[in-house]
Image: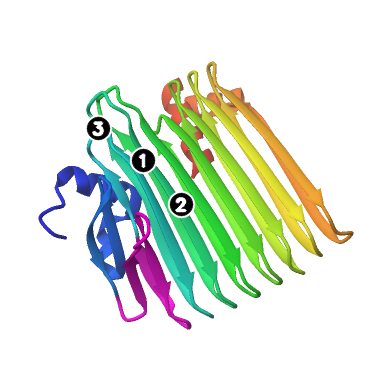
Amino acid sequence: MKESINEIDKQLLTEVSNLENIEKGAYNIRKNGKGIERKVTEHVNIMAKTDKPGINIYVKENTKFDLIHIPVIITESGIHDLVYNDFYIGKNANVYIVAGCGIHNDHHEDSQHNGVHRFFLEEGAKVKYIEKHYGEGKGKGKRVMNPITEVYLKSGSSMEMQSSQIKGVDSTIRETKGELDANTNFVVSEKIMTHGKQIAKTIFDVKLKGENASTHVTSRSVAIDYSEQFFISKIYGDNKCFAHSECDAMIKDNARVTATPEIIANHVEANLIHEAAIGKIAGEQLIKLMTLGLSEKQAEEEIINGFLR
């Protein structure tokens, strides 16, 4: 890494993008609204957009197991960053992509990052996509993140998306959209924890257009203090297809969680399932852990960490 990466930057990059692995593949690091470091490889090219802020990432066909990191970090108060990143994944490629945003705000103005990521997978392509959001800092300025992910899967392709927001984000609206052709699979799992007066809203909108398209959406969340969470899942079955959506949430104190499922079958062989469960931390779990010598607070933390693991 160049000298432009200071200790706060390294901490944020460690939280959202696994700092030790960044240099093992292609990467682009964005800081305070500007790209500061980039590396391309034989199979992965990264180019700046010419019409708006952001980058285009091109993965050659038949590329196998390459790493791509595209972290964003914000260390200045008052930054409002908007970026558009498009991923073009070649036929039969198989890659691992790590994104995410870390905000350090020690002052009183709000800092915000809005990211629009679009994935275009050619036939037979596979992507594992990891997205982490993290906030820290002693200032009263809010840390706001609003990611939008759009996924377009051509025949025989698949994508696994893992997103997590475990600490320090005051407000977020997370939108994930998908359009799936025949014999495709889109797996999404998210983990969210809110506390204080934080607000988190998640929206899934997946269209199963092709025959034998499938999706599995899983949300696990914990809301404590006075925080609020909203989970909205919309799945459209336009062909012979399968979908399973589930929302599991724990609440504590005066927190509030709302889950709104919406499944629309537009084909007689569309098989769509939704499950939702919201409840407080079970008392018997607390008692069991406290008998092992943990305090009530330690027992609660152990239960929450296990639930989000």
Look at the numbered disc 1 and give the secondary structure of its residue: strand
Residue at the disc numbered 2 = 116
Quadrant containing the N terminus in the rendered view: bottom left
Q: Marks 3 and 1, Cα distance to the nearest angstrom?
A: 15 Å
* Residue that mark 1 sits on: 134
Q: In this figure, which residue is indicated by the disc labeled 3?
A: 77
Say which amino acid is labelled 3.
Answer: Ser
Q: Residue furthest left?
A: 3
Q: How many marks?
A: 3
The spot of residue 105 in percent (x, y) is 26, 32
Circle 2 crowding by C-alpha within 10 Å: few under 14, some 14–19, many from 20: some
- At 41% from the left edge and 29% from the top edge, which residue is drawn? 170
Measuring 39% from the left and 59% from the top, which residue is drawn there? 98
Q: Position of residue 298 (x, y in %)?
A: 42, 27
Q: Which residues are magenta?
A: 41-69
Label 1, label 2: how many angstroms apart (C-alpha)? 17 Å
- In this picture, residue 302 sits left or right of residue 203: left
For mark 2, give the secondary structure.
strand
The residue at 36%/75% (across/down) is: 44
Residue 73 percent location from the top left of the image: 28, 46
Q: Is residue 95 above or below residue 165?
A: below
